[in-house]
Image (spheres, rainbow, N blue to C red):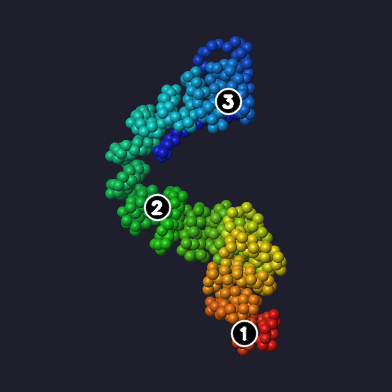
């Protein structure tokens, strides 16, 4: 049975090195080792000694099968018989820690280290408990003891220094780093740790001096130039930072991190052209993390009302696809930037490339299908939408969009299935639910199931009473059946308030008024519809002729019926109206 003992000291000091002690714990062997280290206490009678051993090993067995309550009870019984059994204290403390009872573990571990002061794992466990109980002041002694026991382990020195940092004993922390340097020689970790302390102390010159020395000793190590420039720039010394980076650029002009740092400095100096130029060099470098590059592109988002910001983000994302041609994220962000720039055809191509590289990112599928739907590409919507649903079947928006695609293709039974899927998912998105139930209403209407259609529309409006398209469609279908005309009129009037100057909505309202025999009002709204109609809708001219007929203008009615025919309407009813010069249903 493997077991790990770990501890961390955490604080607001950036990324620090924390000791992580890992060891394989074979219960019987370790227990015998631990027992052998015990400081002699009052000897047990032979029979008691045998009972203690049996109980202890039985407890270990229960622990290995996760029967923690029984194991804890057994360790407690061991301590009742043998109060100085440090191994049981350690095991019982660990059980308490698994239940987040760090306060209960503390006294057991504190007593265990007094009985067996050279047991490294006891001190490690105690350090973890002090940290979890926020007893930072007591950590100094724990790490002092761990260094005494294992002086060659660097992690203990870093942890002791970190404890001092948490206590703001900066000079003491520096002394520990000096000890560690004497033990193992200089290292970047020690250098970085000292830098943090110097900066906390406000000793910028000293922090810079150490890095300058590191540069002298290692003139080809670009990381030291980057650290030094960061110190200068973050403390208002941008000219010094720029000078350091320019030296680094001469040494290694292909280093992407140098170009990123230069871009930051030029941006701070308001030299946007130079900053962008450095960014393009950094983005072309494959060694710079793609995630870092995406983070930089995302920084442009709040500035997108500015055309230059969009253009810059678009160009950087294009370069990203060249530097990282096999990474799906590069094409996904490029697609997003193309979409922001209204380059829909190119955005679709980018999203498809991203999906080809990695089909497991749902958001990219949705972006692609949304574009296809907005462009009235129903074949693409259905094909790519159904592909997405084969991977992500429980996505509500995708089910809805594929349903719209099938409805536009007049396959209402298939559309109905997807709409039902969208409404059956446990989603909290009221807009999506409203749209999906509205789609259900449309499908049921075309399948001649008026009762289910009305119920679906009512459900849609319960989620969004101001869904203008639902209000319009519901009102129109009621008017066609000459049912609930007052309700239809209210809904149609509201849709026109929500979305004024929409020809199809005005046509619906005119037709509801016509069905209510309010012909004069119907004429006003139909004339609005014709004024706003950009498609020369034959249905609107036919409706206008119907209204004029009931207002006694037979000649005007026939003229508009003929117009309807000229714009493509070929129904027998229209022919009869024209031939008989009277309204017919």
x then y, percent, for residue 370: 56, 62
Q: Tell how many labels.
A: 3
Q: CA distance from mark 2 to mark 1?
A: 74 Å
x then y, percent, for residue 210: 31, 37
**Residue labelled with disc 3:** 26
Q: Along the polypeptide, which appears first: circle 2 or circle 1?
A: 2
For discs 1 and 3, the disc positioned in front in the rendered view: 1
**Residue labelled with disc 2:** 282
For discs 2 and 1, the disc positioned in front in the rendered view: 1
| 453 left or right, relative to 175 | right
Q: Along the polypeptide, which appears first: circle 1 or circle 3?
A: 3
Question: Which residue is at 36% across, 33% downward?
Answer: 168
Q: Along the polypeptide, which appears first: circle 3 or circle 2?
A: 3
**Residue labelled with disc 1:** 551
10 Å crowding of disc 1: few (<14), some (14-19), many (20+): some
x then y, percent, for residue 321: 47, 56
Question: Which residue is at 63% across, 69% downward?
Answer: 487
Judge whether 222 appears above or below 506 on screen: above
Question: Residue 536 is drawn in which quadrant?
Answer: bottom right
Residue 254 visible here: no
């Amino acid at each position: 049975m493997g077991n790990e003992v770990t501890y961390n000291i955490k604080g607001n000091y950036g990324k620090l090195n924390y000791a992580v002690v890992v060891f394989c714990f074979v219960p019987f062997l370790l227990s015998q080792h631990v027992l052998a280290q015990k400081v002699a206490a009052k000897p047990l009678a032979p029979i008691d000694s045998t009972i203690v051993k049996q109980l202890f090993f039985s407890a270990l067995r229960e622990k290995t099968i996760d029967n923690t309550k029984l194991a804890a009870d057994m360790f407690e019984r061991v301590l009742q018989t043998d109060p100085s059994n440090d191994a049981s204290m350690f095991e019982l403390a660990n059980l308490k820690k698994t239940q987040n009872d760090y306060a209960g573990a503390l006294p057991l571990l504190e007593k265990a280290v007094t009985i067996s002061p050279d047991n490294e794992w006891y001190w490690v466990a105690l350090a973890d408990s002090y940290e979890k109980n926020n007893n930072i002041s007591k950590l100094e002694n724990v790490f002092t003891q761990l260094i005494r026991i294992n002086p060659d382990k660097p992690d203990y020195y870093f942890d002791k220094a970190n404890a001092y940092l948490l206590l703001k004993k900066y000079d003491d922390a520096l002394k520990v780093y000096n000890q560690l340097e004497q033990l193992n020689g200089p290292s970047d970790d020690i250098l970085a740790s000292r830098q943090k302390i110097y900066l906390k102390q406000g000793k910028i010159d000293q922090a810079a001096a150490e890095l300058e020395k590191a540069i002298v000793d290692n003139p080809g190590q670009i990381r030291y130039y980057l650290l030094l420039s960061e110190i200068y720039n973050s403390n208002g010394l941008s000219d010094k930072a720029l000078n350091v980076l320019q030296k680094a650029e001469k040494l290694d002009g292909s280093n992407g991190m140098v170009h990123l740092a230069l871009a930051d400095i030029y941006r701070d100096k308001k030299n946007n052209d130079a900053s962008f130029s450095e960014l393009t060099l950094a983005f072309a470098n494959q060694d710079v993390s793609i995630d870092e590059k995406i983070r930089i592109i995302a920084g442009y988002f709040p500035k997108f009302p500015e055309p230059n910001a969009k253009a810059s983000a678009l160009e950087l994302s294009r370069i990203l696809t060249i530097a990282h041609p096999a990474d799906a994220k590069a094409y996904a962000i490029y697609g997003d930037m193309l979409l922001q720039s209204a380059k829909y055809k190119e955005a679709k191509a980018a999203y498809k490339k991203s999906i080809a590289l990695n089909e497991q990112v749902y958001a990219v599928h949705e972006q692609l299908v949304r574009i296809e739907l907005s462009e009235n590409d129903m074949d693409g919507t259905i094909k790519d939408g159904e592909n997405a649903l084969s991977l992500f079947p429980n996505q509500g928006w995708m089910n809805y969009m594929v349903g719209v695609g099938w409805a536009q293709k007049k396959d209402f039974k298939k559309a109905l299935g997807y709409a039902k899927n969208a409404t059956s998912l446990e989603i909290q998105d009221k807009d999506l639910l409203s749209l999906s139930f509205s789609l259900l209403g449309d499908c049921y209407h075309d399948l001649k199931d008026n009762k289910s259609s009305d119920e679906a529309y009512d459900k849609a409006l319960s989620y969004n009473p101001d869904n203008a398209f639902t209000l319009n469609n519901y009102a129109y279908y009621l008017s066609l059946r000459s049912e609930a005309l007052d309700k239809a009129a209210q809904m149609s009037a509201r849709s026109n308030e929500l979305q004024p100057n929409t020809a199809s909505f005005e046509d619906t309202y005119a037709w509801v008024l016509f069905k209510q025999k309010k012909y004069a009002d119907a004429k006003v709204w139909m004339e609005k519809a014709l004024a706003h109609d950009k498609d020369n809708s034959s249905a609107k001219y036919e409706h206008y002729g119907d209204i004029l007929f009931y207002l006694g203008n037979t000649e005007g009615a026939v003229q508009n019926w003929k117009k309807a025919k000229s714009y493509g309407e070929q129904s027998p009813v229209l022919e009869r109206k024209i031939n008989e010069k009277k309204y017919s249903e």
